[in-house]
Amino acid sequence: MSAPVTVAIVTHDDAADLPACLAAVARQTQRPLELVVADCASRDDSLAMARRHAPSGVETRLLELGENLGFSGGMNAAFRASRAPWFLTLNADAELAPDYLERLLARLVSSAAARPGAATGRLLRPGAPPTLDACGFRLTRAWRHLDRGSGQADRGQLGRAERVFGGTGAATLWSRAAAEDAAVEPGELFDPRFHTYREDAELCFRLAERGWAVLYEPAARALHRRRVLPERRRALPAFVNQASLRNRYLLRIYHQTGANLLRTLPWTLARDLGALAWVLALERRSLPAYAWLWRHRRELWARRRRLQARKSAPASDLERWFSTDALPLGEGS
């Protein structure tokens, strides 16, 4: 019998982070367990490091993809290589507490929600004093998806298990049944067009539109050395900022309804104009994002039509996330 949980890691020049990440996987109390590492054309010795530090007693598969397919493409390859009913997407720069998987799995199995589709934990940034990194996603009327608690000093806030809009791909446990139900193409966990950044939020939109719940379990804890933050935007590589800009519009092309557009227009328009002004004045290397969206418009609208046609949950189930950060467990099931 295959392991009930797959831990999947996508690497691209992550050799320095892998020893600590894999050591944390080895300490997981959840057993049996399998590990899939998908390498996206690393130029360092990521694959050799993954072989050297593969957890003892954990079935491990290394996928050498040969090209940089991004987090989306790498995770899709790992997802297709696995058959476990639960699938953890894990960043190489994250370290799980030993009971992380066990606590998330217990929360999902015992959930009062009608369709528990994913669970995420309490992620903190390394160092002192303790600082929150992510406690699930929340949405804003400007169509931003933000990590709850990000950058706040950890004073025990957000300490209840709740239902949230979504979870970060850095360390979220997904139900295979939910992911396959929400998939547009077979074997597709994330939309490969996203490549890197915001692909996790897009999956959470699809889950919500199909009636699946995402749960937050604060007792499941992990460290995450997050490098990409809005306040660091000017120091980030050009391809990162370009992908982030492009993908924010992909989310809305796919999932925003006409009614929601009217309700959120003051906030989204202000954000769009601000982004355009920023790019024209300070970040002209991101201008190709707009050109890419125009070139691919027919393909993107075709995918939108497929997504909109597959919705099965009431529109109100998604709309509520624009005005609330969390729901009690079981509510809205």
Image (cartoon, rainbow, N blue to C red):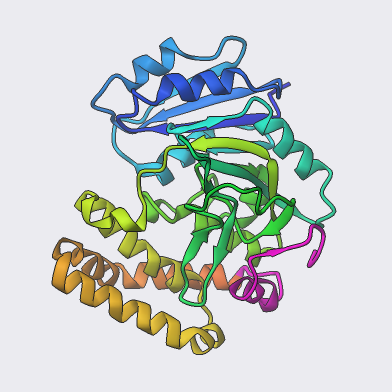
- 97 falls in the magenta region: no
State which quarter of the image contains the N terminus.
top right
Residue 187 versus residue 209 in the image, above or below: above
Measured as percent of width and height from the top left, residue 221 is found at: 62, 37
Q: Nearer the viewer, residue 318 or 40?
A: 318
Q: Which residues are magenta?
A: 310-333
| Residue at x-position 29% and y-position 77% | 274
Q: Is residue 311 left or right of residue 16?
A: right
Measured as percent of width and height from the top left, residue 184 is found at: 54, 57
| Residue at x-position 78% and y-position 61% | 328
How many numbered marks appear?
Answer: 0
| Residue at x-position 53% and y-position 40% | 130
Measured as percent of width and height from the top left, residue 285 is found at: 15, 61
| Residue 22 appears in the rendering | yes
Q: Is residue 32 left or right of residue 272?
A: right
Residue 307 versus residue 44 in the image, above or below: below
- 326 falls in the magenta region: yes
Q: Nearer the viewer, residue 17 or 175?
A: 17
Q: Is residue 321 left or right of residue 109?
A: left
Residue 153 versus residue 2 in the image, above or below: below
Measured as percent of width and height from the top left, residue 73 is found at: 41, 43
State which quarter of the image contains the C terminus.
bottom right
| Residue at x-position 46% and y-position 22% | 20
